[in-house]
């Protein structure tokens, strides 16, 4: 009987101690007043990398989670067909240039000294001009002498006919030279235009060859999975190949309920729990509110506001044997945030506040 009473006394004592401890904790205990919100991890910049040209993927140089620097090569497309086109255009351009040099050489010789078939030279025109001028002077003298009855009309007419013939030959020779020059200039101009088009096309093809190397537009981390499956795949111009996230700054976008948004402030401390990194195994990520968006959004839980939290150390230290490396939290991971409205609030005050809010 005494043993039973003693056991009952122990139970009462333990219960009394529990009640007393609970009351002390309730009265003296402190807790942070926080705002709870779910959300998602976001990078400073997330950029979709698109292909500027079409083709088959020949090599994939990166994998998911790999850190890359600006202008690193990410993917290489097959450029053999473009290389053949560039070579063909180069050969065609060289042939046109050879023809152009020949035309320019012939044109220079034509102008300077010689003639080609029905063409005449500048020298020919000059000589025809001199003959016509001499004939004109001779005719003028004969005309004067004829007026003085010093020569016969036959001599005067012969001189006139000779002048008119040589003048006609001069004009004919001059016109033939002009036509020949015009023809050469036309052919040279046409060939120059043809070569210019070929060269511009060749430069365009060379640029396309350079674009078959898909380059990283920013430094960051590759966030696209299963990139090895791209090899051998046909890519069209403008297709998204992969995504890069700039993790120099990582944010947690929290969706705060409308009744809590008035208690949110820029600079508030925040505790972030990422589902992929259980805090008991890894850590609780710390951060501060950096921006509050004032445009409401409709979600399943009702009206929410986006609050941006800058995560101070967006990585966890993972040990592999004697080695330790940083494992960064990836964009797209979900979790929850606790934003500290007030620190060291009495526990009973926080309980009453939450009961009042729910009521």
Image (cartoon, rainbow, N blue to C red):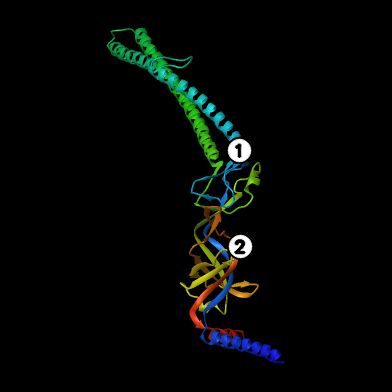
Label 2 crowd (10 A; few <14 / some 14-19 / many >=20): few
Give the x, y percent position of residue 253: 55, 67
Give the x, y percent position of residue 27: 53, 87
Q: Is residue 65 above or below residue 17?
A: above
Any part of residue 261 in sight: yes
Judged from the image, the secondary structure of the residue bearing numbered disc 1 is loop
Q: Quadrant of the C terminus?
A: bottom right
Residue at the spot 49% in from the left edge and 46% down from the top edge: 71
Residue named by callout 1: 78
Q: Is residue 283 above or below residue 242?
A: below
Looking at the image, do the residues carrying marks 1 and 2 touch, with CB atoms under 8 Å apart? no
Judged from the image, the secondary structure of the residue bearing numbered disc 2 is loop
Camera-side residue: 192 or 120?
192
For marks 1 and 2, the one nearer the N-term is 1
Of the two numbered discs 1 and 2 in the rendering, the one whose residue sits closer to the viewer = 2
CA separation in Å, label 1 and label 2 = 38 Å
Any part of residue 359 in sight: no
Give the x, y percent position of residue 140: 31, 15
Q: Quadrant of the N terminus?
A: bottom right
Camera-side residue: 129 or 166?
129
Q: Residue 128 lies in what quarter of the image?
A: top left
Side (left or right) of 317 relative to 157: right
Label 1 crowd (10 A; few <14 / some 14-19 / many >=20): some
Residue named by callout 2: 276
Q: Residue 231 lies in what quarter of the image?
A: top right
Camera-side residue: 47 or 167?
47
Camera-side residue: 182 or 291?
291
Question: Which circle marks residue 252 in the picture?
Answer: none
């Amino acid at each position: 009987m005494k043993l039973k009473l003693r056991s009952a006394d122990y139970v009462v004592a333990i219960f009394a101690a529990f009640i007393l401890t609970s009351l002390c904790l309730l009265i003296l205990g402190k807790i942070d007043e926080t705002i709870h919100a779910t959300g998602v991890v976001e990078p400073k910049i997330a950029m979709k990398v698109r292909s500027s040209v079409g083709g088959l993927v020949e090599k994939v140089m990166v994998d998911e989670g790999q850190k890359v620097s600006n202008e690193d090569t990410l993917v290489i497309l097959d450029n053999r067909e473009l290389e053949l086109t560039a070579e063909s255009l180069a050969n065609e351009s060289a042939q046109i240039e050879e023809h152009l040099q020949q035309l320019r050489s012939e044109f220079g010789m034509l102008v300077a000294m010689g003639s080609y078939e029905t063409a005449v030279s500048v020298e020919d025109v000059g000589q025809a001009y001199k003959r016509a001028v001499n004939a004109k002077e001779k005719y003028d003298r004969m005309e004067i002498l004829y007026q003085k009855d010093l020569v016969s009309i036959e001599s005067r007419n012969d001189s006139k006919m000779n002048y008119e013939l040589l003048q006609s030959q001069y004009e004919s020779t001059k016109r033939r030279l002009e036509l020949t020059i015009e023809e050469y200039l036309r052919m040279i101009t046409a060939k120059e235009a043809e070569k210019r088009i070929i060269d511009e096309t060749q430069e365009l093809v060379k640029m396309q060859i350079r674009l078959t190397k898909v380059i990283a537009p920013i430094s960051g981390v590759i966030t696209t999975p299963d990139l090895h499956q791209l090899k051998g795949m046909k890519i069209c111009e403008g297709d998204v190949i992969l995504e890069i996230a700039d993790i120099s700054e990582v944010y947690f976008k929290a969706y705060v309920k409308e009744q809590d948004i008035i208690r949110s402030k820029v600079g508030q401390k925040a505790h972030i729990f990422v589902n992929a990194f259980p805090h008991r195994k890894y850590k609780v990520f710390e951060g501060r509110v950096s921006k509050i968006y004032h445009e409401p959004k409709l979600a399943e839980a009702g009206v929410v506001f986006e609050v941006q939290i800058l995560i101070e150390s967006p990585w966890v230290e993972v040990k592999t044997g004697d080695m330790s490396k940083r494992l960064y939290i990836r964009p797209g991971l979900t979790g929850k945030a606790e934003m500290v409205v007030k620190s060291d609030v009495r526990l009973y005050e926080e309980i009453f506040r939450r009961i009042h809010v729910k009521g």
